[in-house]
Image (cartoon, rainbow, N blue to C red):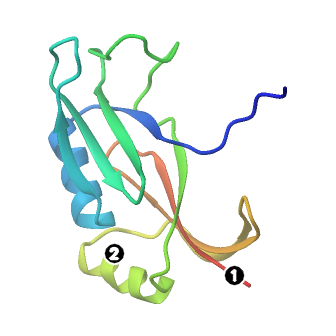
Amino acid sequence: MTCTVDSLDHLVLTVRDIDRSVTFYTETLGMLAEIFHPLDGTTRHALRFGSQKINLHPYGREFPPAADRPTPGSADICFLTTTPLADWQTHLSDLGIQIEEGPVGRTGAVGPLQSIYIRDPDKNLIEISNQRC
């Protein structure tokens, strides 16, 4: 039998300020904030979207086990959306968020993308993409 991975459940972002990150991802990208309490008794924060989530770890106080060198600003994440990029451009402009690049053509996991790029509060690179036919 060959072992294979089927999908992504969650990823972890190490952030300098949990509240600031939650505000950015909920207000800018429409994610849902979640507080959860694992069996170790800690209080943790996550951001839900679709059937995935992003767990947030506070920089310098990461939850074990953690990445070898957890660092704010080291992520490069691509999010798929069916909302036209023109609507995203207006939304981001209204929020005062600068588009770093785009719209530009890119290649995604299942085909071509049209993408714009922004930065979150920790300077992680965020790609917002429409799949193209």
In this rendering, would 126 be left or right of 56? right
**Residue name at image x 38 percent, y 42 percent:** 54
Q: Position of residue 95 (x, y in %)?
A: 24, 73
The quarter of the image holding the C terminus is bottom right
What's under tag 1, amino acid-wise?
Arg
Within 10 Å of disc 2 (Cα), the crowding (few <14, some 14-19, many 20+) is: some
- The residue that disc 2 covers is 92
In this rendering, would 39 be left or right of 130? left
**Residue name at image x 45 percent, y 39 percent:** 10
Image-quadrant location for residue 131: bottom right
> Tag on residue 72?
none
**Residue name at image x 25 percent, y 46 percent:** 21
Image-quadrant location for residue 36: top left
Q: Is residue 96 above or below residue 22?
A: below
Q: Nearer the viewer, residue 45 or 52?
A: 52
Is tag 2's residue or tag 1's residue first in the polypeptide sequence?
A: 2
Mark 2–mark 1 CB contact (< 8 Å)? no
Spatial CA distance of label 2 from label 1 is 21 Å
Q: Nearer the viewer, residue 56 or 102?
A: 56
The quarter of the image holding the N terminus is top right
Q: Secondary structure at mark 1?
A: loop
In this rendering, would 71 be left or right of 115? left
Q: Position of residue 33 (x, y in %)?
A: 20, 50
- The residue that disc 1 covers is 132
**Residue name at image x 50 percent, y 16 percent:** 69
What's under tag 2, amino acid-wise?
Leu
Q: Position of residue 61 (x, y in %)?
A: 26, 15
Q: Position of residue 9 (x, y in %)?
A: 48, 41
Within 10 Å of disc 1 (Cα), the crowding (few <14, some 14-19, many 20+) is: few
Q: Is residue 52 above or below residue 16?
A: below
Q: Secondary structure at mark 2?
A: helix
